[in-house]
Every structure is written in structure tokens, then in C-alpha cells.
Image: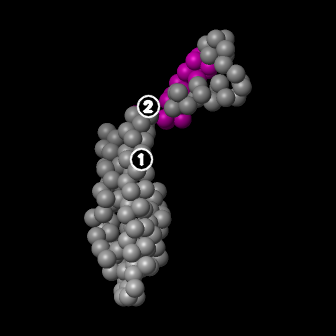
Amino acid sequence: MYILLFLLWVALNGKLTAEIAVFGVFIAGGVYWFMCKNLEYDPKNDIRMVKNSFRAIVYIIVLFTEIVKSSIAVMKIVFSKSVDIQPQIVFFEVPLKSEFLLTVLANSITLTPGTITVDVKDNHFCVHALDYTLAQGFEDSVFVRLLMKMEDKEDDKSAV
């Protein structure tokens, strides 16, 4: 957060000189100290944010990989000579607690070709899949595993 405050100071000044940088270091430090002292900001949040940002990058890479794999599967269905698709609606439950991470999962499913999230209530999902081959293993998918790792780290830090 301190680095973001410093970068905000530099951006608002429009240029970077030695004088602006020195003032920025002290002003960002003062604002950070104020946040920790009076706004109950915990510096451990910074560590969690950095760790989860690396996990988020991995998640985005996996999401793009799954989108490509699913696109190929949907293209095979579309370009096949026999139209033998078996659409399915799948209901499943995931152990995620965070509403934000549930939303990320729902959007990831919808972004993946051939599937769309129809409904989410609490941690219960309803997903429509173009074919039964695309409707398998949602509850223990790579998306759920990666999001669980992100949520576990959040819970570990908040429990301390």
C-alpha cells in the first residue's frame, strides 16, 4: 500500500524530480502511518495482497488456457458432420465462502466457451453446458482449486 501511495503522489505531481520523490516518501509514509494507526489498516494485508496477486496471475493464465481448450472442443462440436450434442444443466456446490471469489468462478465458467453460469445461490451453482463432455468436473475443477488456495490464505491471515 505504501508503494501505491507513493506512486499516486508521483502521478498527481505529473513528473518525478528528486524533490518530489523525497516529499513523496515522507507524505506516503505519513499517510500509511495514519492508515495503520487510525483506520485499523493491517500491514499484513500488503503481504496477502502480494501473494494473492501472484496467484491471480496464475489464475488468469489457467483461465486463458482453459478458454483455448474449450474453444477447440466447441469447434469440434460445431464442425462435426453429425449433430449429436447433449446439452446438460449441472448443479454443484463449491466450498468457497468469499462472494468475490464465487463471482470470479461464475464469470470464469461463463467466459469458457460451451458453458454458462445460469444461477448462483450461496455456494450452489447451476451451469448450462453445450455438451455432456463440457459438463464434467466443475466442483473440483482447476478454477476451484486455485480460488480455494487464494481463500485459504485470506482465512489464515485473518485468523491471526
* In this rendering, the label closer to the viewer, 2 or 1: 1
Q: How many marks?
A: 2
Picture disc at residue 25:
none
Residue 10 picture quarter: top right
Name the outermost residue toward the front.
81
Magenta stretch?
23-44
* Amino acid type for the residue under numbered disc 2: Pro
Mark yes or no: residue 110 visible. yes
Residue 41 counted in the magenta span = yes
Would residue 22 appear left or right of 141 to someone viewing this image?
Answer: right
Would residue 3 appear left or right of 8 to someone viewing this image?
Answer: left
The residue indicated by pointer 2 is 43
The residue indicated by pointer 1 is 56
Residue sitting nearer the eye, 116 or 69: 69
Query: Could you give the CA–CA distance between mark 2 and mark 1, rounded to whole angstroms?
Result: 20 Å
- Disc 1 element: helix
In the rendered structure, which disc, 2 or 1, sits on the residue that comes first in sequence? 2
Q: For the C terminus, which image quadrant?
A: top left
- Report the magenta stretch's main SS: helix
- Report x, y in % for residue 92: 33, 74
- Report x, y in % for residue 90: 35, 79
Q: Residue at x 43, y 56 (%)?
A: 64
Residue sitting nearer the eye, 66 or 139: 66
Q: Colour scheme in the image? A: one colour
Residue 1 counted in the magenta span = no
